[in-house]
Image (tube, rainbow, N blue to C red):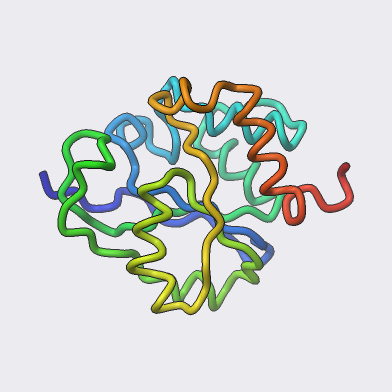
C-alpha cells in the first residue's frame, strides 16, 4: 500500500539534534504522533535518559523534545509498505531536509533502526552532505536483541556528546 507521511517534523530554531525514523507506523498515525505504538519504547527511553516524566499526549511529547533541543522526523515522505514492516518498503521517496536544516542548527543526525539508517545513507546523505549515527530501534520487534538495559546503555553512549551536555 502506498503511504504518505502523516506528520510535520517537530523542530524549532534551538533544535541541535535530529532523530529520524523510517515512516510512522499505522498505530502512530492512529494516535497522531511519532513512536505512538503502545509497546514502542521510544518515549519511555527518552524520558528515562532525560530524567523527565513520561509524556502522554502529542503536545507533551513535542514539548519534551523541543525543551531538550531535539527535532523529530522520518527519512521518508512516502513509500509502499505493508503495515509497519520496514523490510517491506518499496519505492521510497525521501523527505526534503533543506527547510529543516536551514532553520534549525542541527549538529548531529541520528536514525532509529537499520532501515532508517540505510535509507538515510542512500537517499539523503548524498543530497545534504551529512552522515547519520545509527541508534538501535525502540520497536517492540527489537526487544529480544536489545532488552531495556542494553537499549538504555547504547542510546546513552551514542547520545552522550550531544544530548546530555552539562547533565552528567
Give the residue furthest to the front: 145
At 63% from the left and 27% from the top, the residue drawn is 150
Residue at 32% x, 29% y is 27
Q: Say whether residue 10 is left or right of residue 117.
A: right
Q: Is residue 108 left or right of residue 80?
A: right
Q: How far across and down, in percent of the image, does residue 19 sit?
A: 53, 52
In terms of depth relative to the viewer, which is nearer, 82 or 34?
82
> Is residue 40 found left or right of 168 in the rendered image?
left
In what quadrant of the picture does the C terminus appear? Answer: top right
Quadrant (top left/top right/bottom left/bottom right) for the N terminus? top left
Number of labelled discs? 0
- Which residue appears at 55% of the width and 21% of the height? 147
Percent x, y for residue 75?
A: 38, 58
* x and y, in percent, of residue 23 in the image: 33, 47
Residue 37 rendering spot, x and y as whole percentages: 40, 27
Q: Is residue 23 above or below residue 139?
A: below
State which quadrant residue 117 falls in.
bottom left
**Left/right of residue 158 with respect to residue 133 in the rendered view:** right
- Identify the residue at image location x=43%, y=30%: 139
Q: Nearer the viewer, residue 14 or 143?
A: 143
Amino acid at each position: 500500500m502506498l503511504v504518505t507521511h502523516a506528520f510535520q517534523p517537530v523542530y524549532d530554531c534551538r533544535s541541535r539534534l535530529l532523530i529520524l525514523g523510517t515512516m510512522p507506523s499505522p498505530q502512530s498515525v492512529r494516535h497522531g504522533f511519532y513512536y505512538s505504538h503502545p509497546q514502542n519504547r521510544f518515549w519511555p527511553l527518552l524520558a528515562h535518559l532525560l530524567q523527565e516524566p513520561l509524556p502522554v499526549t502529542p503536545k507533551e511529547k513535542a514539548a519534551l523534545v523541543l525543551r531538550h533541543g531535539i527535532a523529530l522526523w522520518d527519512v521518508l515522505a512516502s513509500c509502499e509498505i505493508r503495515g509497519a514492516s520496514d523490510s517491506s518498503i518499496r519505492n521510497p521517496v525521501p523527505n526534503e531536509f533543506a527547510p529543516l536544516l536551514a532553520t534549525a542548527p542541527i549538529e548531529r543526525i541520528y536514525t532509529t533502526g537499520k532501515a532508517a539508517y540505510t535509507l538515510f545513507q542512500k537517499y539523503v546523505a548524498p543530497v545534504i552532505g551529512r552522515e547519520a549515527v545509527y541508534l538501535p530501534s525502540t520497536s517492540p520487534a527489537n526487544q529480544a536483541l536489545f532488552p531495556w538495559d542494553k537499549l538504555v546503555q547504547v542510546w546513552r553512549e551514542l547520545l552522550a556528546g550531544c544530548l546530555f551536555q552539562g547533565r552528567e
